[in-house]
Image (cartoon, rainbow, N blue to C red):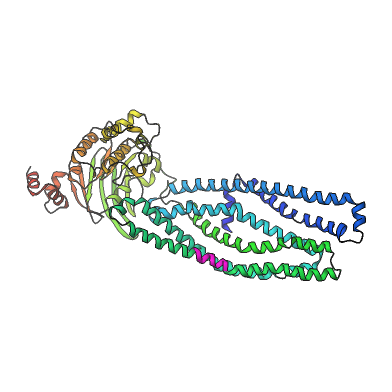
């Protein structure tokens, strides 16, 4: 099974300990045979024997040896089991730690398209519940499987040594157990795959509701979402019950067959003792070891149950484990530690699920220029800027930075030269200065304050009780939209990027603050190319070039003055809406 091989690969560093634990498990299970052998000798020599009194008088040393041996072996067996369990636990915890580190690293390296295909709730299910099932399998299921196999095998051999006919009588029911468990295995496998998917849906629903709690409250949709969650939870509970009932349906057959062994042992064993075929001590040995056959039979159902759950969970984790990003460094990628910020799009077409988002887009931005991109919602503005740092690659055409196709630049070097501030701001649950200095944790405090000043964030930060050491909540809880945008802008500026991308970054600030920010950006102490996605004319009018996208194509391009002359254009229409017809005509006349 590939899942077991995968676990073995990830046990690196713990394999010796795990193998030692398995060896101890085998030894302890074999030792279960020794006590019944000793008891059998005690019965045949000192209890059920014509010379029992003489043996008690003349052979006490043997009796003390056998009784003492039982006590000592029990203590040794308990110590070995404890040691083995500790080794299993340490190995399984090390296994999960290694897998978690690898999975997190691998998830971090995935393309943006990967997150389009996989929901946050599903990924969290894989990294939590599914991993717990893998740890359970490594720490308990494999151990229990080894115990059952060794117990059953060694006991079977010992029974045949004592009396083959008695052994055959006792083992006659075992084929029926295997037939039942095989039918159970085929039925329960798909059920656990379905159960795992429903668990993923449940976690996704919970994650979305927690993340979107403010929106839910704003629309007073709490009861609606509670009902939707109840429905999802009911589906999960139904799948869980179906899987559980599937096992319970087979349980009576397995339990009845296992209990039947005691009846066979009592009847056949009694007849064989009366016939003198086996001694009373051997009968006691059979009786004392009957559980070592019946227990594995009972365990088979539980083990198959857990193995099926393990297979379903491990398969989902392995999908993430072996996922590889499509956007990676090429072998021929060039080293470019310093960028000047020239950007060019050459006949770029981008598709998403066969839908054309950008169609044959071409333009060039010289180093140090400011270019604004405007257009209707869905015109492809955000997709356009996402191709510069290679979050996506074009379907056709080329995106060049400093004259080099971004496909041939090293990702880390390219992205470190680009500062991005998005409209939808994500801030970490950390201090404000840590959020601003995210690109460089050793950034001096003076620099943090400088970049906060450039984004006009210093004013409100320094009014806080702990100013830059103030801890902000998840996603910037406690801050206004404009405050979050300004911290995000400071974080982007702190990279000292060759290319600064602002995706409607000042949409939540007032016009006065926006003017201050624009003036500060015009007086940066380092040269950078600025690409601004804007909805406001005030954010775009001073740009060296304004590009208007419509239906994924460049509809208009030019300066503020040039675009205003086209009275049939999108830019003229937006200017007219935001400033009024009289102001528009006056601006055109100037």
- Relative image position of residue 232 (x, y in whole percent): 41, 61
- Relative image position of residue 16 (x, y in whole percent): 65, 46
Q: Residue at x 49, y 57 (%)?
A: 316
Q: Residue at x 71, y 63 (%)?
A: 293
Q: Is residue 563 left or right of residue 339?
A: left
Tell me if I can see residue 117 in this picture: no
- Relative image position of residue 266 (x, y in whole percent): 76, 68
The image quadrant that residue 149 belongs to is: bottom right
How many numbered dots are placed on residues in this image?
0
Tell me if I can see residue 298 in this picture: yes
Q: Residue at x 7, y 44 (%)?
A: 586
The residue lying toward the viewer, choosing from 174 and 274, is 274
The residue lying toward the viewer, choosing from 450 and 569, is 450
Q: Is residue 372 left or right of residue 444?
A: left
In this picture, is 242 found above or below 32? below
The image quadrant that residue 165 belongs to is: bottom right
Quadrant in the picture for the N terminus: bottom right
Prevailing secondary structure of the magenta residues: helix
- Relative image position of residue 496 (x, y in whole percent): 32, 35
Q: Is residue 515 left or right of residue 156?
A: left
Quadrant in the picture for the C terminus: top left
The residue lying toward the viewer, choosing from 278 and 509, is 278
In this picture, is 230 found above or below 473? below
The residue lying toward the viewer, choosing from 5 and 222, is 222
Magenta region: which residues?
Answer: 240-248
Whether 384 is among the magenta residues is: no
């Amino acid at each position: 099974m590939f899942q077991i091989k995968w676990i073995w690969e990830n046990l690196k560093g713990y394999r010796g300990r795990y193998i030692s634990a398995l060896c101890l498990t085998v030894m302890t299970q074999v030792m279960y045979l020794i006590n019944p052998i000793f008891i059998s000798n005690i019965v045949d020599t000192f209890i059920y024997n014509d010379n029992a009194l003489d043996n008690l008088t003349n052979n006490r040393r043997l009796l003390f040896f056998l009784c003492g041996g039982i006590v000592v072996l029990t203590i040794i067996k308990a110590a070995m089991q404890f040691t083995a369990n500790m080794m299993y636990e340490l190995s399984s915890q090390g296994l999960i730690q290694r897998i978690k580190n690898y999975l997190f690293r691998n998830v971090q390296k995935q393309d943006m398209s990967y997150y389009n295909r996989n929901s946050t709730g599903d990924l969290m299910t894989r990294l939590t519940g599914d991993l717990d099932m893998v740890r359970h399998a490594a720490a308990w299921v494999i151990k229990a499987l080894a115990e059952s196999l060794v117990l059953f095998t060694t006991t079977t051999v010992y029974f045949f040594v004592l009396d083959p006919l008695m052994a055959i009588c006792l083992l006659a029911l075992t084929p029926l157990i295997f037939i039942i468990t095989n039918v159970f295995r085929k039925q329960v496998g798909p059920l656990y795959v379905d159960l795992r998917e429903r668990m993923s849906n449940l976690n996704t629903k919970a994650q979305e509701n927690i993340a979107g709690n403010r929106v839910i409250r704003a629309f007073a949709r709490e009861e609606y979402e509670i009902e939707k969650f109840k429905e999802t939870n009911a589906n999960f509970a139904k799948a869980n019950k179906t899987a559980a009932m599937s096992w319970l349906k087979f349980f009576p057959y397995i339990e009845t067959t296992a209990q039947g062994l005691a009846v066979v042992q009592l009847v056949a064993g009694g007849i064989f003792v009366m016939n003198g075929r086996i001694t009373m001590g051997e009968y006691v040995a059979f009786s004392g070891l009957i559980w070592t056959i019946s227990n594995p039979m009972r365990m088979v159902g539980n083990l198959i149950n857990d193995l099926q759950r393990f297979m379903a969970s491990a398969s989902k984790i392995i999908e993430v484990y072996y996922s590889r990003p499509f956007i990676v460094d090429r072998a021929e990628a060039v080293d470019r530690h310093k960028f000047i910020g020239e950007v060019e799009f050459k006949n770029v077409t981008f598709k998403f699920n066969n839908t054309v988002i950008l169609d044959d887009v071409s333009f060039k931005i010289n180093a140090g220029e400011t270019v604004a991109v405007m257009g209707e919602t869905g015109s492809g503005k955000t997709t356009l800027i996402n191709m510069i740092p290679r979050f996506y690659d074009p379907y056709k055409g080329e995106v060049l930075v400093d004259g080099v196709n971004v496909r041939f630049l090293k990702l880390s070097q390219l992205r470190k030269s680009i500062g991005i501030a998005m409209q939808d701001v994500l801030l970490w649950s950390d201090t404000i200065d840590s959020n601003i200095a995210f690109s460089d944790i050793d950034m001096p405090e003076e620099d943090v304050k400088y970049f906060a000043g450039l984004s006009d964030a210093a004013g409100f930060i320094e009014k806080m009780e702990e100013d830059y050491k103030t801890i902000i909540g998840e996603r910037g809880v406690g801050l206004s939209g404009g405050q979050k945008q300004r911290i995000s802008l400071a974080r982007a500026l702190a990279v000292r990027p060759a290319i600064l991308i602002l995706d409607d970054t000042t949409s939540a600030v007032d016009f006065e603050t926006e003017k201050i920010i624009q003036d500060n950006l015009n007086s940066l102490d380092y040269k950078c190319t600025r690409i601004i996605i804007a909805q406001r004319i005030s954010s775009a009018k001073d740009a060296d070039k304004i590009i208007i996208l419509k239906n994924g194509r460049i509809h208009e391009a030019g300066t503020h003055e040039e675009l205003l002359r086209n009275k049939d254009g999108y830019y003229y229409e937006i200017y007219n809406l935001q400033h009024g017809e009289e102001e528009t005509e006056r601006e055109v006349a100037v």
